[in-house]
Amino acid sequence: MKKTRVLTRKNNLKTRWNQKQAILKERNLNLAHPVVKASYTWSIISEQLCDMLGPEIHHQWFKSAKPLVISSNVLILEVPNHFSAQWIHTHYHELVDVLLSVLDNRLSSFFVSQSERNQSTK
């Protein structure tokens, strides 16, 4: 039963990814661009997280996450504060990476807070 549910979710993710790629082609957007790819990848993963964890948990931890870029096969996501970044890393990072691996087994994620990002650009 559990294996069937996992396979169904995996197929749903791949289907959503293929649908998003078709939309990109229609709009002449380049999925090879790291910012565009980050945005579309996160939209698919975020939907799946909402389905799996429920809207309350998704809203609390993932709603405000903003995809920045995919660099060196890492999806970099910005969250509002350091506490959120730490909490997600401790409790949900493995789940996010498993979902990403369904789309591309080379991808992983990294959550950074807005303040950390601002400090690194100075």
Image (cartoon, helix red, strand yellow):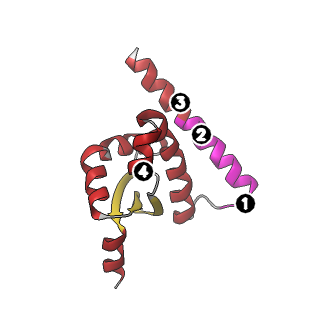
Q: Is residue 94 above or below residue 78?
A: above
The residue that label 1 is drawn on is: 28
Name the foreground residue: 69 vs 33.
69
The residue that label 3 is drawn on is: 11
Tell which circle, 3 or 1, labels the residue nearer the N-terminal end.
3
Would residue 102 be seen by someone viewing this image from the given angle?
A: no
Mark 3 and mark 1: Cα distance apart in space: 26 Å
The residue that label 2 is drawn on is: 16
Considering the numbered disc 4 on the image, is that residue within a helix, a strand or a loop?
Answer: loop
Image quadrant of residue 54? top left
Tell me which residue sits at (48%, 31%) in the image.
10
Q: Is residue 121 magenta?
A: no
Q: Is residue 17 magenta?
A: yes
Tell which circle, 2 or 1, labels the residue nearer the N-terminal end.
2
Mark 2 and mark 1: Cα distance apart in space: 18 Å
Considering the numbered disc 1 on the image, is that residue within a helix, a strand or a loop?
Answer: loop
Name the foreground residue: 15 vs 119.
119
Tell me which residue sits at (72%, 60%) in the image.
28
Mark 4 and mark 1: Cα distance apart in space: 28 Å
Considering the numbered disc 2 on the image, is that residue within a helix, a strand or a loop?
Answer: helix
Q: Position of residue 26 (x, y in %)?
A: 75, 53
Q: Amino acid at mark 2?
A: Arg
Mark 4 and mark 3: Cα distance apart in space: 22 Å
The nearer-to-camera label among 4 and 1 is 4
The residue that label 4 is drawn on is: 62
Q: Which residues are magenta?
A: 13-29
Tell me which residue sits at (74%, 58%) in the image.
27
Considering the numbered disc 3 on the image, is that residue within a helix, a strand or a loop?
Answer: helix
